[in-house]
Image (spheres, rainbow, N blue to C red):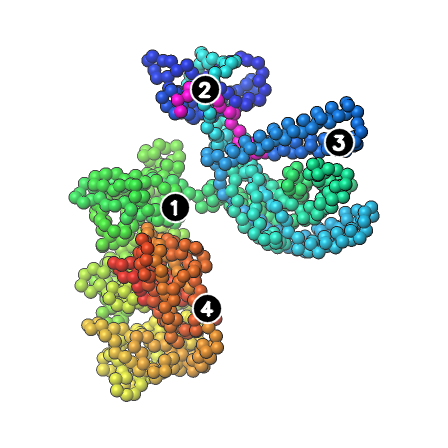
Amino acid sequence: GKEDIFKLKCVDLGRLDHIRIWHDGKGFFKSPSWFLDRVEVSDPSGSKTVFFCQDWLSNKHGDGSVERKIEAWTDPAIMQAQASALANKALHIESTTASKKMQSGKIMSQRKKEQLNALEDTTIEAKNVAEAATEKANKALTDPSTNLIDYVLTISTEKARQQQTERSTSTSDVKQRSRTGNEAQAKTMEEKKRKSSQNLCPQGVTVEIYGEKPADTSSFKRTSSLNEKQKGRLHLSKSSSTNSTSPRSGSPLSTQVVPSSSGRMPVLASSDTMFAPGTDVSVNVRGLDVGRINNIVLRYDDPLESESLQRVTSCNTHSSSTKHSSSMMRQSKSTTSVRNGEKRPLLWNVKSVVAKIPAKGERVVFTRKGEKWTLSQHENSPLELSIPVTVVEELIKTVEYEVLFYTGDEKGAGMPSNSVSLILCGDQGTTEPFAIPESHSIERNGVTHVKFNAKDVGLLIALRIRLEKGSWFLDRALVRCICKSIEINFPCKNWLKSQQQREYDLLPEDNSVISGKASTPLGKTGGSIKLKTKKYKIHVKTGDVRGAGTDARVSCILFGVLGESRILPLTNSETFRDPFERCHTDIFDVEIPNLGQLTKCRIWHDNAKFFPSWFLDEVSVVDEETQSGYVFPCYKWLSKSKDDKQLVRELVCADADYRARSGTYKITIHTAAGDHAGTTNQVMATIIGENDKRHALVLPSETGHHFVSGSSDEFVFENIPFIGDIRGCILELFPDEATGDVDKWKVDRVEVAELMSGNSAILYNTQKSKIISEVGIFKTKDAISSSETQRSLQSITYQVKVTTGNVRGAGTDANVYLTLFGENGDTGERQLAKSKTYTDKFERNHTDEFDVEAVDLGILTKLAIRHDNWGLGGDWYLEQIQVFNPETNTTTTFPCSEWLSKKQGLSRELLPA
């Protein structure tokens, strides 16, 4: 960190290119080894040149050299711009040489020959200098230390009418040329231009972004060692030294800014009509970080201009050699592009450019406001357009988080690190799950230190720890964010066991977030900031089904547009001392950060105690401040032994008008006559209305009084969400609580009526046998005949979207097979072989799309999914499957959120959400 300053006198050297620095390798009391960071040279005019070294000058360290040659630092983008200028200069000299050679003719004096030879030598020398500069710039651009970033550009082009207006005068040049050239050739050329101008798109598009940045953010190259001593060396002595860990004031590494460029970034055209009129094209390019952006420059090849250049070049082939054809092309460009001092009419009418820089969290807008296309100095791009910055917006920023886990001093307290992942929950959202690398150990009485970059979630409200397997005694966790000067302690002092619970939420100490000011050293806090929270009431309604209640511990997580809550244990009910009993509605108070509009609720139980199975009707959440209500229908079992054997349910928020209008519905079920036609099982009826709106109702029945042979049973339900015109009904039998058996049931028809509006429908069994073994679907006669006709005439290509979960090891290499079941039958088992979205399918956090062609199945009732456990990574965590029917424009969601593995089963039967 020590800085030495020396004053030396010498002749004026002009612009400094490089320096050589060494030492004699001697020293008795100190080691002669020296690690040199950089050398800064300034002159009386205030000009400074920086020479970066960052290497050893030592016989023992590094490459063993005590002498270095260090080149002056230059921004790679500036190097590229300088190389481009040298190339243009060389081209200009070449064009001048060719022009003078043509004017001289074949017979010339000795003096003119010498002058031409001198010009040719100058041309060759200029070309060599330009090539060397270009090679040096390209090497700097491809250097690993160069700071390259991604730019996501959206280029908007005006509609065709405006472009055609600007092009209306583009044929005037050709008409002028036709007076002096071949008339027929001119007319042919004019016709070609007229046709091409109707749908003309720019080719060879490049983008260059300009800005300015501090010199200390730029990259530099390593130095080279020297073995040979040189003459003219200056010995450094009588220094004035300062001990400092930061650059001194006035250094180019502190406050000085330099102009910078991203370099010319080519846009790879996917088609000839990529930038057609009225289009918005998004492309991803990679270039240098320019710091603060000032403007953007677009360049492209004008197809009409190129055609003119080719014509002029072909006419001049008889009067010039092939060697100078390129220079004549450049010369013809200057004569054909400008006529009477006017620029050519605009060909590409760019409206605006939007640049997103994910690495910096910026969105920059360039809106064109009268800027004109001009002639470019670049050889391959005749036209260029420069647009200054209009708006700079902030995107989602990422920050570096540092987490220290302190494992307790208990027997067996440690565990494998590859089974742990963490999520930070804040008032501005949550981070993506971060899996602790295998290289980090979690040992008894040890400290595990991890760092990761994630989006800024604001004030931290919880640290969520997810365990895949094993047990861990965690004493506490410490979370730091150095850039925000935050340090938060999350106490635990408890066992975390994956067998009991997969996710645990740790809360900050004293339920507050400690935040230091920007100038406060880390760990010395500037006070406590209380989180802004909201109060919600959660209403949980248990169904009216035999054995519906549970003694297990229930928890949930609420999701909103602003993020998600921590894990909310539902323990103290306001309404009942013993919560989650049959036909009870339990109310719980929670206080959490504002989630905005709620979108989803994840609810589960731990499957503990004697009767864990639970039938959940719905969850309702009320925002006490705004009195906004959100309804999450379920009407399914959370059980390891019933239904689809799932303990976790992902409940989607119902439409805003779900409870806005309600009605009174009467359901009449006509059981067929005959022996063994009735059933003793409990029944759930799901009525279906307009736009596939559904509502499930558990029918209160008693054995021996309802659903007997030849009977008609009526059930009336009040305050039911209005579903519009009645389209169908699904009857589902619940297995017997004691035996688990299902008595088959023969049903003739079902009558559904909405008593307030008078809307009613008679629904008939879609199965010819009329026997319900588990699920029966009922429709109107017209719907049944229509579906049978469609089914016999054509097939349907179902679009199946399979979402793999975002947990460690979620992906699989196994072969996956699927079967769809509906009211008209099933597809049979189909292998999901070719994904439309990913080459490597069923990977973590991916959604793969497949086409499944089959006859019309009607209303989908269930889905069977399995895999063959092939490959090393056979286990698969399936999040959900969505099936889209293009004929009815409906999507059916089958949630899963479970592992398909050898331990937990390779197959699942999923029911619609």
Spatial CA span between label 4 and label 2:
74 Å
Task: Identify which residue, 25 or 505, lies in the foreground.
Answer: 25
- Of labels 3 and 1, earlier in sequence is 3
Task: Tell me the number on the disc at residue 623.
Answer: none
Q: Nearer the viewer, mark 3 or mark 1?
A: 3
Residue 797 vertical placement versus 371 (above, below): below
Residue at image mark 2 = 227
Spatial CA span between label 4 and label 1:
42 Å
**Three-letter amino acid code at disc 1?**
Val
Residue at image mark 3 = 101
| Residue 64 lies in the magenta stretch | yes
Q: Which element is circle 2 on? A: loop
Work out which quarter of the rendered image holds the C terminus and state it.
bottom left
- Of labels 4 and 1, earlier in sequence is 1
- Of labels 1 and 2, earlier in sequence is 2
- Of labels 4 and 2, earlier in sequence is 2
Spatial CA span between label 4 and label 3:
72 Å
Residue at x-position 59% and y-position 51%: 156
Cβ atoms under marks 4 and 3 closer than 8 Å:
no
Cβ atoms under marks 4 and 1 closer than 8 Å:
no
Residue 40, x across and y down, in percent: 49, 22
Cβ atoms under marks 3 and 1 closer than 8 Å:
no
Residue at image mark 1 = 457
Work out which quarter of the rendered image holds the N terminus and state it.
top left
**Three-letter amino acid code at disc 3?**
Lys
Examine the image and state in which quarter residue 713 appears: bottom left
Residue at x-position 37% and y-position 49%: 432
Residue at image mark 4 = 797
Magenta range: 63-81
